[in-house]
Amino acid sequence: MSPEKHAALLEPLAVALRLEQEGRQSFLDAAANTKSKLARQTFEFLAKEEDKHIAHIKEFIDSITDTDGQKLFDAGISNAEEKLASFNARLKQLKDEITPTASDVEAYEFALKFENGAEEFYAEQLEKSDNEHVRKFYRWLIDEETMHARLLKSCLRFAEDPTAWFTEHRSS
């Protein structure tokens, strides 16, 4: 692989790594600063998710540098839908223990903006790449970030109007 192509693959991954690290720290900070049990658990869950993304990005970077791009790391298929369903099921179980606050809403809105920004960056990288393995990796990241955004939207909806949230999720 040419040095230019090598750099073209690695540069956006370095940005992705930074995004995930910043997201992790933001989620840890939000978890530490919230008084709400749900918000704390949500942000702790998201920080752990970012740890997984960081590990995958590092493995992808290593596969580029170690094999000169000949054998790229395969992140597999995202299980984002399962994680979201599990999270919403857990939210239903906590209904009697949770009292959302205005600060929860602000924290969820901030986190949602961050996740949407990361998803947009990954979508741009997906569009720029003509390498099937690189595209698959960015697709995995997009699926993960989309799930995080949907999870945060669910929490935001719950915090803003718990009755409506339970009505919407009654049959699921």
Image (cartoon, rainbow, N blue to C red):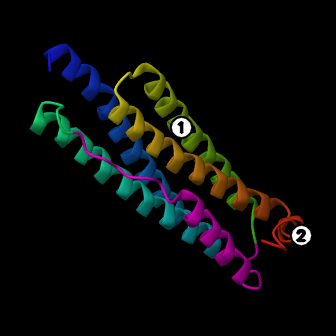
The CA span between labels 2 and 1 is 29 Å
Q: Residue 90, image x and y in percent?
A: 64, 77
Q: Is residue 88 magenta?
A: yes
Q: Residue at left 26%, top 45%?
A: 73
**Eyeballing the image, is 91 above or below 23?**
below
Q: Quadrant of the N terminus?
A: top left
159 sits left or right of 111 in the view: right
For mark 1, give the secondary structure: helix
Q: Is residue 73 magenta?
A: yes
Q: First in sequence, mark 2 or 1: give its number.
A: 1
Q: Amino acid at mark 2?
A: Thr
For mark 2, give the secondary structure: helix
Label 2 sits on residue: 167
Q: Quadrant of the C terminus?
A: bottom right
Q: Which mark is residue 119?
A: 1
Residue numbers of the magenta segment: 72-99
Q: Which of the 4 image quadrants contains residue 48?
A: bottom left
**Eyeballing the image, is 167 above or below 70?**
below
Q: Is residue 36 visible?
A: no
Q: Residue 77, image x and y in percent?
A: 44, 53
Viewer-closest of 156 and 73 = 73
40 sits left or right of 62 in the view: right
Q: Is residue 121 visible?
A: yes
Q: Residue at left 25%, top 28%?
A: 10
Q: Amino acid at mark 1?
A: Glu
Label 1 CA crowd tier, 10 Å (few <14, some 14–19, many 20+): many
**Eyeballing the image, is 40 above or below 16?**
below
Q: Residue at left 45%, top 45%?
A: 140
Viewer-closest of 127 and 133 = 133
